[in-house]
Amino acid sequence: MRVPTILLMGLVLSGCVSSSEPPFQPVPPANLGSTQAAHPVPPATIPAGLPPGYSRHITYRDGKFTLPDGSTVPADPNGGFKISTGAYIPPDGAGGIILPNGARCISDSARGYFCP
């Protein structure tokens, strides 16, 4: 006799629970930032006529160079800059720069460089 009473009470109480509430949506921890996907940044257009393999672009804007990895470094008055390893990259006097690994980057005609 107790089992049917318990079942009946369970049915009655389940009808009291509102089903119109929106489903639970987890909230990301505050330290994760936005969970929306960032819009991809299109790669720089490489002009025709560059030597083969010159696919990296160092751009210049507002006194700073933006390196291929996305980091920015301040330009010095001579047109060179210092990279994160501490190496100084001076202009080579012929419109380009020589990287520490010996690769030569050529001018993009906008104070930046195309590099292999």
Image (tube, rainbow, N blue to C red):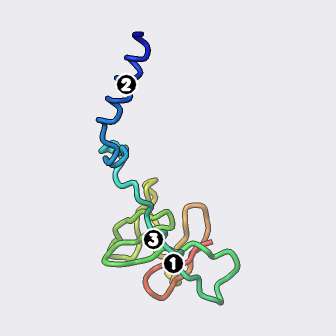
Q: Where in the figure is residue 49, as x and y percent of width and height?
A: 65, 89
10 Å neighbourhood of mark 1: few (<14), some, or many (≥20)?
many
Label for residue 44? none
Q: Where in the figure is residue 70, as x and y percent of width and height?
A: 45, 64
In the image, is residue 108 above or below residue 54? below
Task: Determine the image quadrant of residue 39.
Answer: bottom left
Name the kind of residue labelled 3 in the image.
Pro
Q: How many marks?
A: 3
Query: Label 1 belongs to which residue?
Result: 113
In the image, is residue 68 above or below residue 50? above
Pick the front one: 1 or 36:
1
Name the kind of residue labelled 1 in the image.
Tyr
- How far apart are labels 1 and 2 at the CA level? 74 Å
Q: Where in the figure is residue 10, as x and y percent of width and height?
A: 37, 25
Q: Are marks 1 and 2 in contact (CB under 8 Å)?
A: no
First in sequence, mark 2 or 3: give its number. Answer: 2
Pick the quarter of the image with the C terminus: bottom right
Q: Residue at x 39, y 65 (%)?
A: 72
Q: Is residue 28 left or right of residue 67?
A: left
Name the kind of residue labelled 2 in the image.
Gly
Q: Secondary structure at mark 1?
A: strand
Q: Is residue 116 left or right of residue 44?
A: right
Q: Tell us which disc is closer to us: 1 or 2.
A: 2
Q: Tell us which disc is closer to us: 2 or 3.
A: 2
Pick the quarter of the image with the N terminus: top left
Q: Is residue 100 left or right of residue 63?
A: right
- How far apart are labels 2 and 3 at the CA level? 80 Å
Query: Label 2 belongs to which residue?
Result: 10
Label for residue 90? 3
In the image, is residue 33 above or below residue 71? above
